[in-house]
Amino acid sequence: MLKIGLTGGIGSGKSRVADYFQSWGASVVDTDAIAHSLTAPGGRAIEAIRGEFGDATIAPDGSMNRQAMRDLVFQDAGARLRLEAILHPMIGEVTREQAEQARGCYLVFVVPLLIESGRWRDKVDRICVVDCDPATQIARVRARSGLTQEAIERIMSVQVSREARLAAADDIVLNDGATTLHELEARSRALHDGWCKLAARQDSTGNDKVY
Ligand SMILES: CC(C)(COP(=O)(O)OP(=O)(O)OC[C@H]1O[C@@H](n2cnc3c(N)ncnc32)[C@H](O)[C@@H]1O)[C@@H](O)C(=O)NCCC(=O)NCCS
Ligand SMILES: Nc1ncnc2c1ncn2[C@@H]1O[C@H](COP(=O)(O)OP(=O)(O)OP(=O)(O)O)[C@@H](O)[C@H]1O
């Protein structure tokens, strides 16, 4: 099955674009959503996080305290690496399980840290970047979450630059401040149509990658 790695900076529009692909019949494995389920009440990562960071990072309902963890890990690179060391292997495991169930003409992996991790290039046929200017990323995340500009900039500072993402891209969906949702949908649709054709060619040659 054709495999697409979909990435972009915080607030670039990855989820929105992935929702379009899914509505047109693609399978989507969303690593952000997997990270959320692992850290929900009773999630598989909770006891490891409690052991590593203490009770204060677990909320009364048994979920990870996201605000406390965000304040910690985006100020302290060591803490971020310790959290990632717990979560990323578990995310990888669930990603593989979900990928095995995939149906449809292609499979999209939504991976915020695809370029940062360096492990995805060989696992996907194409890397698709949702491209957005930093000022619009900040405006969208502020509107959505109420985080301060400073907090958003701290998160962006530990992600790769817009240029580095674009340099790794096979396909680009421009979703900057001038892009309407209608235009975003049309740009996504053009990629979807191209990938469906590519997937049909790949199937006929028997060329497939093993995830
Ligand atoms: C730090 C946490 C607690 C903040 O939670 P919060 O609810 O505020 O954000 P959420 O999980 O919805 O992520 C929103 C966005 O933040 C950015 N982000 C999240 N984690 C990271 C990270 N480790 N490095 C850089 N950016 C990150 C991504 O753009 C992501 O899409 C949370 O993001 C987390 O558990 N991160 C570690 C797991 C991880 O690396 N996830 C991202 C890739 S799967
Ligand atoms: N072209 C657009 N016009 C208006 N709103 C948009 C546009 N693109 C995205 N948005 C909105 O901006 C917000 C961020 O988009 P989305 O959640 O898809 O980004 P994301 O890359 O998945 O973010 P994150 O990395 O934080 O999870 C959402 O509220 C979304 O509806």
Image: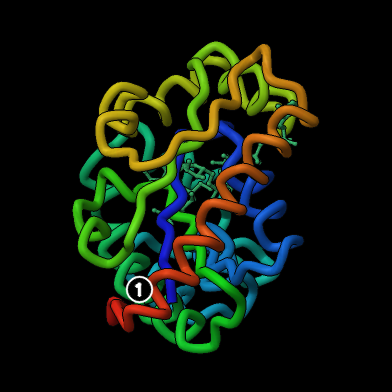
Q: Residue 4, located in which quarter of the rendered image?
A: bottom left
Question: Which residue was labeled with disc 1?
Answer: 92
Residue lying at 24% horizontally and 39% vertically, measured from the top left: 77
Q: Residue 42, located in which quarter of the rendered image?
A: bottom right
**Is 62 positioned to the left or the right of 69 in the image?**
right
Where's the N terminus, which quadrant? Answer: bottom left
Image vertical order of residue 46 relative to residue 154, above or below:
below
Image vertical order of residue 206 relative to residue 117, above or below:
below
Kind of residue indicated by mark 1: Gly
The image's colour scheme reads rainbow
Residue lying at 35% horizontally and 54% vertically, measured from the top left: 126
**Is 182 positioned to the left or the right of 186 in the image?**
right
Residue 134 location in percent, x, y?
Answer: 49, 16
Of residues 90 and 125, the one nearer the viewer is 125
Image vertical order of residue 180 relative to residue 79, above or below:
above
Q: Residue 78, located in which quarter of the rendered image?
A: top left
Q: Residues within 10 Å of mark 1 (few under 14, many from 20)?
A: some
Residue lying at 60% horizontally and 71% vertically, measured from the top left: 27
**Is 79 positioned to the left or the right of 29 in the image?**
left
Residue lying at 28% horizontally and 48% vertically, measured from the top left: 79
Residue 16 location in percent, x, y?
Answer: 68, 44
Task: Tell me the SS state at disc 1.
Answer: helix
